[in-house]
Amino acid sequence: MKYIFMALGLILALLLILPAFLGERLQIERSTFVSASPEKIFAYIEDLNNFKTWNPFLEAEPQAQVMVLGSGVGSTYSWEGEKVGKGIMTVSSIEQDKKIEIAMAFIAPVEGKADVIWEITPESNGANVTWAMTQDYSYFRRYFKLVMPSMMNAAFDSGLLKLKKQLEEEGPQ
């Protein structure tokens, strides 16, 4: 019995200490090359109405409610659904034809905040599009960092592939 309590105590100690080694900040970044002009890519991404067509998170729940208000800095994209939860993205900064910065607030099922950047880097015959997200986690939520990279990398790759296809093959809709 003594060894069982010692083992349980050791496991508990590890669970309490492990988050300190995980760090609080998670950064996800994925990129793809798009054969379109940086101006065309930027204009498409900047219009949050278009995000509905390449947002990979809506694949799980296409009937989720999405609302876009405004354009440019201060415009918002909000969502709500059973599977996708509830949240809002607000455009916080725009560098014309280069970068869009977004403040994201997750409301449900878990509250949280993240910063998102969509960046367009000109290259010959097109541009590289980067989708990055940075999120800080409280001490015990740092365990999410063990699974989030693989989930988010797959989602970002899927979204960027849709974006690439829309801009290269189908053209903006």
Image (cartoon, rainbow, N blue to C red):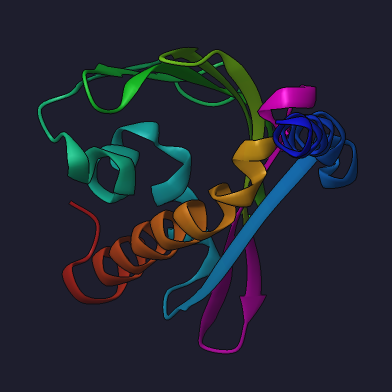
At horizontal 67% and vertical 27% (from top left) the residue drawn is: 141
Horizontal arrangement in the rendering, residue 54 relative to residue 19 (left or right): left
Asked if 153 appears above or below 69 in the picture, the reply is below
Please give the range of residues in magenta: 120-142
Q: Is residue 81 visible?
A: yes
Q: Nearer the viewer, residue 23 or 130?
A: 23
Q: Nearer the viewer, residue 142 or 76?
A: 142
Q: Nearer the viewer, residue 106 or 120?
A: 106
At horizontal 60% and vertical 89% (from top left) the residue drawn is: 124
Quadrant in which the N terminus appears: top right
Residue 67, quarter of the rendered image: top left
At horizontal 56% and vertical 69% (from top left) the residue drawn is: 31
At horizontal 50% and vertical 74% (from top left) the residue drawn is: 32
Q: Residue furthest front?
A: 1
Q: Is residue 96 visible?
A: no
Residue 134, quarter of the rendered image: top right
Magenta stretch encompasses residue 6: no
What's the magenta bit mostly, secondary-structure-wise? strand
Magenta stretch encompasses residue 131: yes
Asked if 164 appears above or below 7 in the picture, the reply is below
Q: Position of residue 118 (x, y in %)?
A: 59, 50
Asked if 52 appears above or below 83 in the picture, the reply is below
Q: Position of residue 126 (x, y in %)?
A: 51, 80
Q: Nearer the viewer, residue 12 or 42?
A: 12
Q: Position of residue 93 (x, y in %)?
A: 70, 30
Residue 102, quarter of the rendered image: top right
Q: Position of residue 39 (x, y in %)?
A: 52, 60
